[in-house]
Image (cartoon, coloured by chain):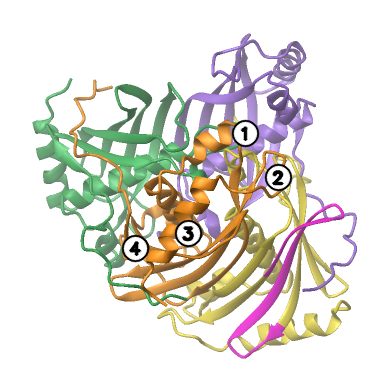
Chain colours: A orange, B green, C yellow, D purple
Amino acid sequence: MALPNSIPPDIKPHDGRFAGGQHFFACRVYFEDTDFSGIVYHANYLRYMERARSDMLRQLEMDQNAAYESGEGVYAVVDLSMKYLLPAKLDDDLVCISTVRTVRAASVIIDQNIMRGPDQLTSASVHAAFLSPAGRPRRQPKAWTKAFTSVMEQTDTK
Amino acid sequence: MALPNSIPPDIKPHDGRFAGGQHFFACRVYFEDTDFSGIVYHANYLRYMERARSDMLRQLEMDQNAAYESGEGVYAVVDLSMKYLLPAKLDDDLVCISTVRTVRAASVIIDQNIMRGPDQLTSASVHAAFLSPAGRPRRQPKAWTKAFTSVMEQTDTK
Amino acid sequence: MALPNSIPPDIKPHDGRFAGGQHFFACRVYFEDTDFSGIVYHANYLRYMERARSDMLRQLEMDQNAAYESGEGVYAVVDLSMKYLLPAKLDDDLVCISTVRTVRAASVIIDQNIMRGPDQLTSASVHAAFLSPAGRPRRQPKAWTKAFTSVMEQTDTK
Amino acid sequence: MALPNSIPPDIKPHDGRFAGGQHFFACRVYFEDTDFSGIVYHANYLRYMERARSDMLRQLEMDQNAAYESGEGVYAVVDLSMKYLLPAKLDDDLVCISTVRTVRAASVIIDQNIMRGPDQLTSASVHAAFLSPAGRPRRQPKAWTKAFTSVMEQTDTK
């Protein structure tokens, strides 16, 4: 087994970012994402969307892992709706665009569209609730509510 | 549902790259990758490794999708061995280092190590064979054998 | 490596079945299904639901694989909505109850509820369209439309 | 959304069982398991094998969940090797045959072969270590070591 050489400093995972009050996150379709019909398995778009939401929280300096470990709580999806407009295929480069739509004391609603260049592949709305370790709804940390609200106010789409 | 704004041009999936005859590819650990014991589910490292191999082929301008669609063939894993040294956790930034070890007419053996900074988490050796649409071993396209051989000759680790 | 002994004839995968015009399908929660927060990852319920729909088609003697291979077509999810009411945990025994709600020429709408004993964990509605190999909506085979309609007429829930 | 009818009592997930000192566990290939090349994605056989091992522990009355929750420990794969002999396809009925090969104080080595009828699709050897919540190797509960040893002594294959 090779002793690995030192890792070039530019080899880092993709970070998404906000622009115009929306969050943009890229992903590529790999073998694991497709099914025998040649296109991305429908449940796997939810994995892309979750990666995008996790990245959004990271960009807003919300540390989900620390909140969970400290017993504060964790987000869980409580409601989602999704339309599949066009299929994605192996090697496609996709972008998930996330828009904060509603911020409540204990939950947040985020619209998420997956694009391939100019083509919209899916549209979804995801309602995530903040839950205590016992699984009960709990107020989000104040800084998080504030961050989501701030993002929402910058959103320049209707 | 928001009309998506235009996508910033810097929002693109991570591309790995070669350095010193080894291929480096980054990925981040998301919710989907972990299991209830708090660490990455053991089978999911194989998904990271497959992403890294697919990226390696892409960097070498081997178009797996086109080869499959044209009926030429597709790689399939025929043999693998893997050691798990340290566990990865949510939000970890990982790098998969791939080293071409052996190139045969119809297959290739690649060593793959997954690192978290200086720590090696897993080590593996993967033997992938090129298969015809009927599932029979078939010679790899000549340009591909040549590309793998060329990479192997540049490798400066033992 | 052991030469495997002969396989006992009772070792067969679970088959679901219809009762009262509804389809019942069981599954158990394994490591792979959970995430670090200790519960089933939200996207994985869609995998349970797809297994249940595939089993439903199998019970109705619709051969999805043959239809795909012959170039007739394949079902794809075009729209879904889902509520998460209670979380599932490792080792839970679940039952997915599927109810055919609407049968159209080229698509079908199925309600799917996941239960753990008397507790309802999720409720969902899935709209699946039959697509040609080129991805265009196509009439379902007549026998399939008939089978779905027949099931729907037997359904004794409202 | 339909009020679900009562669940027929025969709708239960598949349970594997021991015969001749080997453990037999069935699974069926669903859409989620396949990739665009039309066969089961190589990493997914590890999921089948993990289901089989979990079922084996369940048949031996080892409660992994309770051991984890009580802070006693959890099994983690530390080493595996696997050969892929023949591919599985959508709708295939598979059986995973598991044979306990070696029992140590803090780990166990299990051979696992996946069969489709008389055809062997994969062969693997999996080394699983019992780990404390801090991730350190820890002696397995005595009853578990005893159960594994007892199984091994009944194995009538070489």
- Mark 2 vs mark 3, foreground winner is 3
Q: Earlier in the sequence, mark 3 or mark 4?
A: 4
Please give the residue where the numbered disc 1 appears in the rendered image.
Answer: A71
Q: Residue C33: image x %, image y %? A: 61, 45
Q: Does the residue at mark 1 contact the one at mark 2 (Cβ under 8 Å)?
A: no
Q: Is residue B71 left or right of residue D43?
A: left
Mark 3, secondary structure of its residue: helix
What segment carries the magenta color?
A: C102-124
Mark earlier in primary sequence (1, 2)? 1
Q: If you read the primary sequence from the N terminus, does the residue marked by circle 3 or circle 1 appear first? A: 1
Disc 3 versus disc 4: nearer the observer: 3
Which residue has dot 2 on it? A135
Which numbered disc covers residue A95? 4
Q: Could you tell me if the residues under marks 2 and 4 are in contact, i.e. CB atoms within 8 Å?
A: no
The relative height of residue B68 versus residue C73 in the rendered view (above or below) is: above
Separation (CA) of disc 2 from disc 4: 32 Å
Circle 3 sits on which residue? A149
Tell me the crowding category of disc 4: few under 14, some 14 to 19, or many 20 or more residues within 10 angstroms, Cα based: many
Residue B140 in view (yes/no): no
Q: Amino acid at mark 1?
A: Gly
Query: Which numbered disc, 1 or 4, marks the residue closer to the eye?
Result: 1
**Label 2 CA crowd tier, 10 Å (few <14, some 14–19, many 20+):** some
Q: Quadrant of the C terminus of chain D?
A: top right
Is label 2 or label 4 in front?
A: 2
Circle 1 chain: A
Disc 2, SS: loop
